[in-house]
């Protein structure tokens, strides 16, 4: 993605402030607001407990898949951190549509005179194998293109299909994986394949979780195989050796259940019914400790709340520090929040998601709301020395801003340098050492300035209606992104996002 610096002139800023898309409210003196933001920036750059909180979450709680015992512990861990800081906090329940956890996964590759057992990880929403496992032919599916399926023909039916991948090096490659998986798996399911085996894309044979594209609707065993083992199997197949794969996937599966978000809150003084939401997801996949995705940003938000409370800062608007659950399995925690807080959404001034690890924040995605850009620029002025910052006004799907966007609430995602995020995404290697403490503190200062700006500034964007959200879908690639993340059908069915406006009943005589 290209990066460029936006210069906001006074004239352009004034034009944005008088836009009819901006509502006004009574404002504290700008000088006082900036002094408070500067205090907060300085506080989080200092010797706070933030890094120790991250270590504790990663090492003592560990991987936190929603529905697991460690996830339950993480909720209590977060509540205790907020309350110890004197910040009001509560756990809010929401509905998860399906339980999916891996107990164990193993595989054996067999051929004439050979047998080896590469490590595998079940993909989230994989089906379990029968108790004794499932054995089927293993076929070289190339990269899973339409041409590859034409080449395999009827042989794909009833077989495990080994799909080649590139080694993942950056976030762009990660989104490419997600996009390509939709087509690969659609073709595999249509062919009648027994299941799909992806060659691991992470360096160093790291295993990781990568959601099945159709989510809980999936009916087949699906897995990732360590890269070196998959390459060995691929070479054998291409040398003409017939192989079989035996897989044993022991999974804990179930229907809908209740999970909990954690919400810390500092209530506003003059506009308490207007809300700024700062969000990071508490859940993670279970192979690693979930430092980059997304423990670091959980620790950041807790520390911002702690420092605001310690400094006695009083925002005009209410600030909610939202630690979401269910993000990895379909952003269900934030969806649950907008459902349970539906009556309050007209008063939500902004919802932020920070979810790209520990890389330096370079600006924010404003998600198709041009009048939001100058407001972000204004809020970031107290942290200008930590920039430059560039706002990118395109909609992005894949984290907990989604349901705020679908409900018409102004929403942001922190745009971050990739750092070590891509290769360690959802992987066994996502541990405490992946996060640079100095960069995390700098990011906390940036988010603190942003949050304080939106909690105290005069301007506020009004909530959009469904028609405006639909217009954004028509003018951007938002629809395709939603399909890639398996959330489009819910929007189309009217079960996710702002419902259509009710039509007035026809007059009767």
Image (tube, rainbow, N blue to C red):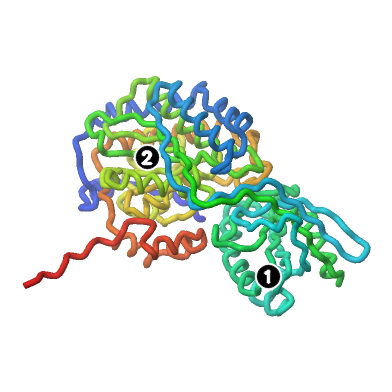
In the depicted view, which residue is nearer to us: 9 or 196?
Answer: 196
Please tell me which residue is depicted at 31% across the width and 59% down the height of the picture.
499
Contact (CB < 8 A) between labels 2 and 1?
no
Q: Residues within 10 Å of mark 2 (few under 14, many from 20)?
A: many
In the depicted view, which residue is nearer to us: 443 or 144?
Answer: 144
Residue 364 appears anywhere in the view: no
In the depicted view, which residue is nearer to us: 249 or 441?
Answer: 249
| Circle 2: element type | strand
State left or right for residue 375 relative to residue 135: left
Circle on res. 401: none
Where is residue 32 drawn, in percent x and y? 27, 26
Where is residue 441 drawn, in percent x and y? 51, 31
Where is residue 197 drawn, in percent x and y? 71, 61
Q: Nearer the viewer, mark 2 or mark 1?
A: 1
Q: Is residue 37 above or below residue 10?
A: above
State left or right for residue 328 relative to residue 113: left
Please tell me which residue is depicted at 54% across the width and 62% down the height of the picture.
217
- According to the picture, the residue beneath numbered tag 2 turns out to be 277
Report how far apart the C-alphas of labels 2 and 1 lie in the structure.
Answer: 44 Å
């Amino acid at each position: 993605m290209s990066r460029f610096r936006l210069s906001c002139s006074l004239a352009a800023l004034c034009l944005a402030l008088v836009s009819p898309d901006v509502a006004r409210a009574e404002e504290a003196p700008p000088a006082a607001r900036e002094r408070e933001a500067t205090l907060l920036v300085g506080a989080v750059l200092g010797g706070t407990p933030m890094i120790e909180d991250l270590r504790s979450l990663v090492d003592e709680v560990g991987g936190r898949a929603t529905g697991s015992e460690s996830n339950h512990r993480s909720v209590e861990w977060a509540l205790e951190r907020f309350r110890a800081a004197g910040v009001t906090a509560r756990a809010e329940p929401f509905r998860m549509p399906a339980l999916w956890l891996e107990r164990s996964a193993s595989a054996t590759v067999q051929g004439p005179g050979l047998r080896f057992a590469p490590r595998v990880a079940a993909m989230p929403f994989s089906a379990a194998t029968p108790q004794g496992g499932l054995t089927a032919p293993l076929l070289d599916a190339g990269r899973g293109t339409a041409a590859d399926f034409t080449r395999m023909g009827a042989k794909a039916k009833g077989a495990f299909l080994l799909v080649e991948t590139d080694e993942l090096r950056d976030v762009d490659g990660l989104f490419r994986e997600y996009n390509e998986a939709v087509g690969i798996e659609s073709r595999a399911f249509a062919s009648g394949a027994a299941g799909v085996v992806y060659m691991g894309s992470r360096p160093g044979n790291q295993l990781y979780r990568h959601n099945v594209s159709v989510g809980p609707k999936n009916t087949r065993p699906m897995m990732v195989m360590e890269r070196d083992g998959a390459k060995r199997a691929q070479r054998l197949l291409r040398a003409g050796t017939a192989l079989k794969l035996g897989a044993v996937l022991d999974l804990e599966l179930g229907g809908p259940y209740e999970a909990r978000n954690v919400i810390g809150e500092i209530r506003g003084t003059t506009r308490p019914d207007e809300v700024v939401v700062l969000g990071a997801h508490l859940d993670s996949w279970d192979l690693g400790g979930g430092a980059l995705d997304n423990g670091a940003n959980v620790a950041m938000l807790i520390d911002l709340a702690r420092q605001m409370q310690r400094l006695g800062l009083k925002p005009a608007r209410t600030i909610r520090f939202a630690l979401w659950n269910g993000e990895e399995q379909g952003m269900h925690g934030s969806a649950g929040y907008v459902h349970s807080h539906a009556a309050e959404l007209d008063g939500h001034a902004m919802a932020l998601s920070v979810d790209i690890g520990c890389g330096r924040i370079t600006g924010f995605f404003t998600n198709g709301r041009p009048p939001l850009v100058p407001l972000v620029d204004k809020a970031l002025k107290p942290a200008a020395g930590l920039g430059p910052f560039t706002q990118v006004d395109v909609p992005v799907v894949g984290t907990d801003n989604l349901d705020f966007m679908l409900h018409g609430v102004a929403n942001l995602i922190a745009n971050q340098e990739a750092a070590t995020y891509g290769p360690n995404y959802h992987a066994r290697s996502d541990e405490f050492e992946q996060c640079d403490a100095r960069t995390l503190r700098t990011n906390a200062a940036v988010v603190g300035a942003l949050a304080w700006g939106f909690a105290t500034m005069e301007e506020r964007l009004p909530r959009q209606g469904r028609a405006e959200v639909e217009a954004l879908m028509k003018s951007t690639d938002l629809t395709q992104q939603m399909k890639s993340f398996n959330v489009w059908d819910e929007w189309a069915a009217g079960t996710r996002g702002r419902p259509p406006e009710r039509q007035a009943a026809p007059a009767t005589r």
